[in-house]
Amino acid sequence: MIEMQYVIDSFPTAFDVPSAYIALSQMYIENNEDTTTADSLLRQVLEKFPTSDRIPEVLELLDLKNTPADTGYAKLYLNKAENFLIDDENIDSAKYYYQYIIDNFPESDMYLQSRFALLWIAEQYEAPGDSTLFFAYNAFIDSFPSTPWAREAEKIVKAANRQKQREEREQEKDSDTLGENLLDPNYRDSAEVAGDGEYLDPMVALYIDPDGKKAIQMPNDPIERRRKFIYPVEAYRSRWEGDLYFQILLDFSGEVSDYILKIRSPHEAIDREASETVEAMVFDITQIPDVLQESWFVYRYRVIKPEKLR
């Protein structure tokens, strides 16, 4: 308690001082059974640090949630932004509150989250169709390296780069084989449409690999999952769950070296999260016959909504 009081007295403006007040208040309760002093310390946090990220905790301890005192901190505005974005799909109001946090709470833990959220909203709802967002995400990564939100931005950039590379490969393939395919009366486009314009069932197209050969059903489950699927917050409202289907290519060690998401979910965020999860899987290559080890495999990935959404 003496050391905690020393922090409060010696570093009155430090970022972590509100945490010291809270810790000291709980020590007075646990060791001295002195609730009067404990409450006094907590009220000093409200008076001296009204915009601290620890204010919600102080309000809980003082039983002041949903009272006039419950205002003025970043988490409050973050909740408003997320409610507008997820529940109401009111993009302009969500952007207003994210920007309010950026302008008024530069030291808050919600500052970076809000900056990332504005980029994400621009990507999802206002994509300009050029490289503007790509450069914005990279600038964010460079400015805030090794932070959780920079890692989220890196995932988006990597996914965009992979998609661009696939599109370029498909364009090259289409260019190289166009004349040959037009002369072949048995040609079928493996994406969705047969050569005569007839619709091709996605489950049929699923088993045609990028080279026009037969894709093989993956015979076994992964032996290692290096990444856990986290259900995206932006998909909470839909409560969607179901199956996504991938074509995957394995390297000599059983790691996924390339993949194509063939049958998607209704949500881009779920697709992206599932793609990152599948890409991090490792399969037992010894259980696959040698003649098939360089084949594209069809892999079904099931998305299950969190228990709290049930």
Image (tube, grey):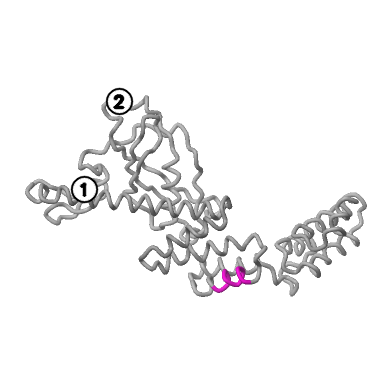
On screen, 267 above or below 64? above
What span is in magenta? Answer: 96-103
Tell me the SS state at disc 1: helix
The residue sitting at 28% across, 30% down in the picture is: 292
Q: Which residue is mark 1?
A: 173
Residue 165 is situated, as x and y percent measured from the top left of the image, at 32, 50
Examine the image and state in which quarter residue 149 appears: bottom right
Q: Which residue is mark 2?
A: 289
- Alpha carbon distance from label 2 to label 1: 28 Å
133 vs 54, left or right, is: left
Tell me the SS state at disc 2: loop
Which secondary structure type mostly characterizes the magenta part of the structure?
helix
Q: Earlier in the sequence, mark 2 or mark 1?
A: 1
> What type is the residue that disc 2 sits on?
Pro
Dots 2, 1 in contact, CB < 8 A: no
> What type is the residue that disc 1 sits on?
Lys
Residue 188 is situated, as x and y percent measured from the top left of the image, at 15, 48
The residue sitting at 36% across, 65% down in the picture is: 130
Task: Report the number of discs.
Answer: 2
Q: Residues within 10 Å of mark 1 (few under 14, many from 20)?
A: few
**Which one is closest to the eye, mark 2 or mark 1?**
1
Q: Residues within 10 Å of mark 2 (few under 14, many from 20)?
A: few
50 vs 218, left or right, is: right
Please give the label number shown on residue 251: none
On screen, 149 above or below 226? below
Nearer-the-camera pick, 303 or 164? 164
Nearer-the-camera pick, 48 or 69? 48
Residue 304 is situated, as x and y percent measured from the top left of the image, at 47, 48
Q: Is residue 154 magenta?
A: no
